[in-house]
Image (spheres, grey):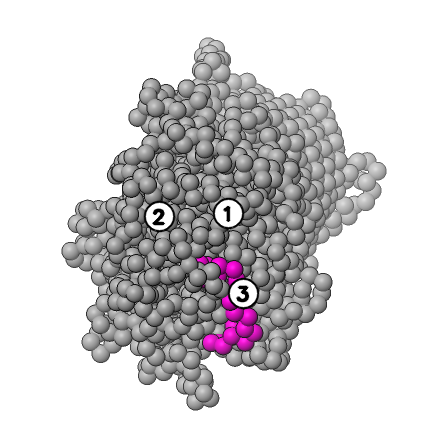
Amino acid sequence: MYAQDRPITGTVKSSEDGRALPGVTVLQKGTSKGTVTDLNGNFSITVPEGATLVFSFVGLSTQEVPIGTSNVIDVILEPDYARLDEIVVIGYGTQKKADVTSSITTVKSDDFVKGAVKDAAQLIQGKVAGLSVTTPSGNPVSEAQIMLRGITSIYTDATPLILIDGVPGNLNTVAPENIESIDVLKDGSAAAIYGTRGTNGVILITTEKMQGIMPATIEYSAYTSTQTIAKKAEFLMADDYRRLIAQGEPLTDYGATTDWFDEITRTPVSHMHHLVLKGGNGKTNYIGSVNYKYSQGIFKNSDVNRINSRLDVNHSMFDGILSANINILGGSEKYWAGGDGYSFNTTIYRQALIRNPTDAIKDANGDWVEHPGVFQYENPVAWLKETDGENRNQNFRLSGSLTLNPISGLKTKLLLSTHYWNQTRGYSETKNHISNVRDGLNGYASRGSSSSIDNLLELTAEYNKAIDRHRFTLLGGYSYQDYVGENFWINNRDFPTDAFSYNNMDQGNGLLDGLAGMDSYKSSSKLIGFFGRVNYSYADRYLLMASVRREGSSKFGENNQWGTFPAVSVGWRISNEPFLQSLAFVDELKLRAGYGVTGTEPNDPYMSLTRLTYGNRILVDGEWIREIRPSSNPNPDLRWERKAETNIGLDFALFESRVSGTIDVYKRNTKDMLWNYQVPTPPYLYNSIIANVGEIENKGVEVLLQLVPVRTPNFDWISSFNYSTNSNKLVSLTNDKFQTTNDFFDTGYTGDPIQQSTHRVKIGGPIGDFYGYKSIDIDDSGIWIIEDVDGNPVTSNLKTTDDKKILGNGLPKHYASWNNTFRYKNFDLNITMRGAFGFQILNFQRMFYENPTINIRYNVLESAYDNVYGKNKLEDTQEYVSYYIEDGDYWKIDNIILGYTFNVDNVNFIDKARVYVSGLNMFTITGYKGVDPEVNRMGLSPGNDERDKYPTTRTYSFGINLTF
Amino acid sequence: MKNRYIKYFIVTVFGLAITFNACTDLEETVYSELIAEQFNPSEEDVMAVIGPVYSNLRDFMWGWHGFFCCQEECSDIIVTPVRPNGWDDGGVYRRMHKHIWTALQSHTNGLWARAYSGITNANRAIYQIESGNLPISQGKENYLAELKVARAFYYYILCDNFGNVPIVTRFDVEEGFLPEQSTRQQVYDFIVGEITGNLSLLSNDVDQSTYARFNLWAAKTLLAKIYLNAEVYTGKAEWDNCITQCNDIINSGAYNLEPVFSDIFKTENENSTEIIFAIPYDEIYTAGWPVFYIHLKTLHPASQATYNLEVSPWGGNCAIPQFIDTYDDDDSRLESTWIMGLQFASNGDTLRCNLSPEMMGKPLEYVNILQSVDLSGEHEGYRIGKYEFKMGALSGLSNDVPFFRYADVLMMKAECLLRKGDADAAAALVTQVRGRAFIDNPGKSTVTGAELQAGSSYNYGFYESGVVTEPEGGGDIQYGRFLDELGWEFAAEARRRQDLIRFGVFTTKMWLSHRPNGDYRTIFAIPEAQINTNPNLTQNPGY
């Protein structure tokens, strides 16, 4: 201890509730010397005379306090509404929000959607401008759909790259309760450091981490929830049938009264328990958690049972020169399977909708009532009871890192990770199942398994240096990833008994009769990258980020495996310019501009290779031998799809951060677009080849506005508003080698018996156009009148394919959300609202079931007997016409959560206690007639609201959080 | 000291990472397929390599909207009307029936794509043999000849249906090669040249070893077929050439008429001595689409119980009533070809209608009446029963689909004789074919030359709900009776379109809801999807 050093002690408290803050970082400014506050918010540090202490804590404004005469410094930290000091995860590192030059949105756990959320994506639903998170399915097994800034790639799906603590995973790799923050890298300049798969954006999930000193602490949280159907499809009931029969409709009254929907649904009860154990000293800390969640779906049998466990241990030695991290994620998932590899089987739902409500479930003998001669008509309750199935997934990820800081400012890190996933499937149908009653299978069972191993090695070195007003960070790294996937599947039939279900596969005779199936497959791929990045800042005013990634994928042709993905972005913190210092109300004003290139690789490997397979059989001299044929048209020239994106943005915070926000404008062009291109046969063996053809363009604007209208000790109101718009255009579908005469292709499918494509993708037009016959009227005999190619009316039986027209578009043009947080004393209230506007939906339920002509066989919607166009009852066959395309605009009051935090200062053994009630998907304002206007937006046929889509639900939860 | 170790550590780790070969090695490992470069076929693989040329025929014939539907739906024997349970499919079947198809018709696009798939696979096999990639020590020329004839078969299909198509005979074309279109005459000349040039190299064995492959006789039947239609293709008739080929086959004694008509189409029909060329199917070995699914396409769903089918049928296509009305009452081929009347489950229960309000609960009886192609009852129309539906049949039948059979050779010769003026000789051959059809009344099997020269008994005309509302009859059709004979013998054998064109009926007569819609429709439009991929293609006239 030098003579001029002084020991300083003090306490750090929060301005919000006046409580002590543990874990606050206390640093001597300009050095790496520091400590953290203990559980009671106390700290002690020895610093030289004249030093300044910097107090920082996530979510609170950083405060700098020069030491004065007193050796005691007590500090009260204020919430940081604009969060300028917030740490943003940028990929292979972090950055202060103020230094960020690209378009990145961070959502901290405090702002997550709470309650019984499905997965990580639903946590940030409506929280990130430009990120569309939809939950079109009420199936507890299904994931949310996420799409960032429109459809930029038409061959592979639009799902962003998801990294959990730097390692690729999916939305269910960790339990939502483990997540501390989610960072979304939106623009190309941010995502380019991930080169490949960065095209659809990158979602960085950061799990809860320990920092500093904390005595062993236990946290427990739990909720229980139930659901109701958000909106029920209104089909005819038994009374309606009898009324119609009385009116002379030739329907059949079987004499019973059955509410089929009621028979297959229930009031589901779900619950979640989350236990965390954490603690540590300055050198070693740990956090372990177990998360158990059992969710029931609204349909009987439909469920999912998840256990996720996690252990994260850190140790630092040699005065922080070397530190190590071990992270273990383990999970298992189990759910009922209503078919081979299914979860809930929506056949059951469809059959319940279309089943005659006067029919009985069982006959007098106790047998299921079936009508084997009626096409595609099966007793849904029998389906539920006579099938047995289970899918089990196991998930194990082991990762570890060694970080070495040999000299001040230099950090090198080696990260190793291996991720095992495997799935075991079983499914069976009894002898009372329709598959035997009608089709004579005499019992059916299948088993399957899939597994994959992902390995990752990453080596990075980062160097930080500040010289005068220059600050820079250099990053260099290498990444190696490999993947092996395999699967296996068998089925058998004609079993001696139902007793074995799928557990004694060899008992079936199907194998001997040549009627059993078997299948297995294995594939692998590799991805290798080198990358570098420089961040530079001058005087906290002029910011620069430049990065490049050179990446190779084994999936491409030998000469095209490597691609280079550069990015550059600049920022200007105008608010730090001297000429703006006089404007005291401006806290932050930053202009950003970035450009970056990212790449996409195809999902499937081997497409550049000429592969042969033993295909169909041919009869040669009385024997059926296997032919050898090429598997596909090889494309040795296959290369990266590349997306170049320009993003210009503005960040601002005004009036002590009471008004803050971000505006981003972007344009992204995807070139060398991967697509299954149609080619002539001959010379090609098959009529399509995957090739780099075409270009697609997306443009859009995103606005995030955050207001703090009220900020008082007892009452806070924070309000944030998000808006985004996107438009896309298919620019071309050709390249030098592949030229098309036509400028379109049709996609999407109605299913039988209508059997039409639903969408057309046309060069110069947007993705998502509905394309079909435009109905304009109905004639006296109830037949559609179609507008023909010249605009003249023509009866439906005279229409030709030339008469098809663009009938709308399934991709919303505008998305908006409005989130409000209120805190009054110990109460907190969160309301999340969101909506989508400017799009259409093809209502499949109406297209198939708003038609009285099929009522003789199948139940129909109540509206089927309504007059069409106010004129006549429909007498035409089921058809895809524009009458069933509706505007989809909606506004949802999605998440409401009301919480109360108990005052536990006087309770020794509890540190924190909070209870809450929450509702998800609470109210929808829409003119759409279907069940829910939030329908599928992925792929090339967005806006198709399938007739038996698992209906969405309204979820009510009650939860509790306790810290001991 | 500590720092030095750390430096060593860094140098070592980076050094290892960069020097290891694996660091930048992106070689693919393939597990479940073969890599062509690493696979050297041996002589044992010859048929496996040739295989796709033949296996492609299954998709060609009974793939979705396959050759069968394409040739029958546009003709006067079979129709797929809109049913209470669907079958509008955006009007795709109505367009075939009404001759208002466009270049977007899926039937014709499928036909083109499947035919060229066969051709390209043949070109590939020829290339592999000629280049030595597929070593053949003995009989190399014979394999090549067989492949060229099989390829000519696909070109014959294209010539017949599209006329002006590209001829491609090489597999090793340069990158970016787009085939040039040839005229129908050029295609015809090419086919005739390919077949005649290779006949001598083909096997004349008629046994298991050549079954469902192009032996000499299958090739000669193909050649006869092309000569029979030469006038349609080129404007120049080749009756004598056709007769020569037919005579060779007849004189060889290699084939016979099956004594029982239905045996040609039974489940295990591969030993039939009448079949010259067939597309073999097997419910087990060729399971998985495309399968031979005619039972599913034609039967009412309730008929599943008659045959204990594993899959519910879809209730689609059926006979056009005007054609059924042409049968002689004693012609057993009526019942051998069509399923009619009351239907029963295998246990004897009466099957009942259940698809439409009018018919609900009534016994299912297939009746010889149709409202129109735009609307039909679930029970309307006789169903196709020519191919045996085995009890307990799966999605695909095991019946081989005969493509050329001996009766056809006799009838081709008879038609040529008739057209050359030798009606009596023609009548003798037709009588021979009719022999097995009139077991109960053998006298009726005899037909005279004069009868053959008469018109058709088909009551052509616009038809609605059992009534020919705009009758025009068939009496004016030259050799119309012979066309009727072809219908009775070969109904539902995927050939009616060609026969109607040869007899000048295809684009001139009305039947059911069909009205003539232009002579240019004797060939189909070049599919738009194909023009799209190959800008060298010019659309056929009229479209």
Task: Point out residue A798 in the picture as x, y percentages from the top left corner.
Answer: 61, 66
Look at 61% across and 61% down and name the residue there: B517
- Which of discs 2 and 3 lies nearer the camera? The answer is 3
Look at 38% across and 67% down and name the residue there: B327
Query: Would you place residue A114 above or below residue B219 in this image?
Result: below
Q: Are marks 2 and 1 on the same chain?
A: yes
Q: Are marks 2 and 3 in contact (CB under 8 Å)?
A: no
Which residue is label 3 attached to? Answer: B476
- Chain hosting mark 1: B
Identify the magenta region: B462-484
Q: Earlier in the sequence, mark 3 or mark 1?
A: 1
Q: Residue B427's image quarter?
A: bottom left
Q: Earlier in the sequence, mark 2 or mark 3?
A: 2
Q: Residue A549's image quarter?
A: top right
Query: Would you place residue A362 above or below residue A275 in this image?
Result: below
Query: Would you place residue A179 above or below residue A31 in this image?
Result: below
Question: Which of these two is toward me, A398 or B435?
Answer: B435
Q: Are marks 3 and 1 in contact (CB under 8 Å)?
A: no
State the CA–CA distance, disc 2 to disc 1: 17 Å
Which residue is label 1 attached to? Answer: B229
Q: Give the number of the disc on residue B405.
A: 2
The amino acid sitting under disc 3 is Asp
In the visual, does B447 lie left or right of B112? left
- Chain hosting mark 2: B
In the visual, does B124 lie left or right of A186? left
Query: Would you place residue B534 above or below residue A768 in this image?
Result: above
The amino acid sitting under disc 2 is Arg
State the CA–CA distance, disc 2 to disc 3: 30 Å
Q: Residues within 10 Å of mark 2 (few under 14, many from 20)?
A: many
